[in-house]
Image (cartoon, rainbow, N blue to C red):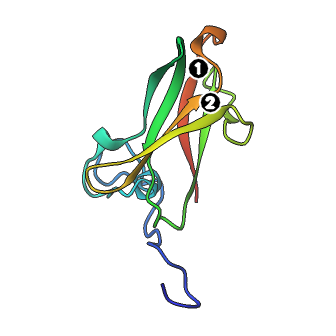
Amino acid sequence: GSPGSADGNPFVGDPLADDDGDGGVAIVEYLQGLSDNIPSADRFPKVGVLELDGVSYPTITFRQDPMAVDATRFIEGSNDLVSWIDLEANNFVTHVSTSTDSDGMPVHTYRFNFGFEGLERVFLRLGVNY
């Protein structure tokens, strides 16, 4: 880095644009180290299930570019798609693992702290502050 200047890649452009037409807005693609000029829906956040000691936990897995200095992320959950809660801030999720995507980008997986058995339904999403 350079003393007196920020390290990383600044965001440039319209944060809500979808120039590549893949359904992902530019600021989310930026956070994930993707380009809004190249379709990349196969690398968007994914929800899944983690089986652990006989319990099935909802999970969310996503890429996060450590050089994306102009955006921060948060994980949200809802049971009705209307009211959303920050799951990390409320200690409802636990970091499970970090792996590396084929291009070297970190990929993080988080799980709910309680299994599906106690949930009527759950929706997960990755939010981005810019």
Q: Residue furthest front?
A: 53
Report how far apart the C-alphas of labels 2 and 1 lie in the structure: 7 Å
Identify which residue is drawn at 28% across, 51% down: 20
> Farthest right residue?
90
Total numbered badges shown on the rendered structure: 2
- The residue positioned 44% from the left and 43% from the top of the image is 62
Residue neighbourhood size for the residue with mark 2, other residues' Cα within 10 Å, grouped as few (<14), some (14–19), many (≥20): many
Return the residue at label 2.
Answer: 77
Q: Give x and y (percent) for residue 116.
A: 58, 13
As drawn, the residue found furthest toward the bottom would be: 3
Give coordinates of residue 110: x percent, y percent. 54, 36
The vertical placement of 52 against 3, above or below, is above
- Residue 112 lies in what quarter of the image? top right
Most foreground residue, 51 or 44:
51
Q: Nearer the viewer, residue 111 or 67?
A: 111
**Residue flagged by tag 1: what amino acid is it?**
Val
Residue 56: x and y in percent read 52, 15
At x 72%, y 36%, the residue is 91
Query: In the image shown, does 48 or 40 lie closer to the viewer?
Result: 48
Q: Secondary structure at mark 1?
A: loop
Q: Earlier in the sequence, mark 2 or mark 1?
A: 2
Point out which mark residue 64 bears: none
Local crowd size for mark 1, using a 10 Å CA cut-off: few (<14), some (14–19), many (≥20) = few
Q: Of the residues shown, which amino acid type is indicated by label 2?
A: Gly
Residue 115: horizontal and vertical position, in percent? Answer: 60, 16
Please tell me which residue lies in front, 105 or 54.
54
Q: Quadrant of residue 30?
A: bottom left
Return the residue at label 1. 122
Tag 2 secondary structure: strand
Marks 2 and 1 close (CB-CB < 8 Å): yes
Task: Find residue 67 and report its image quarter.
Answer: bottom left
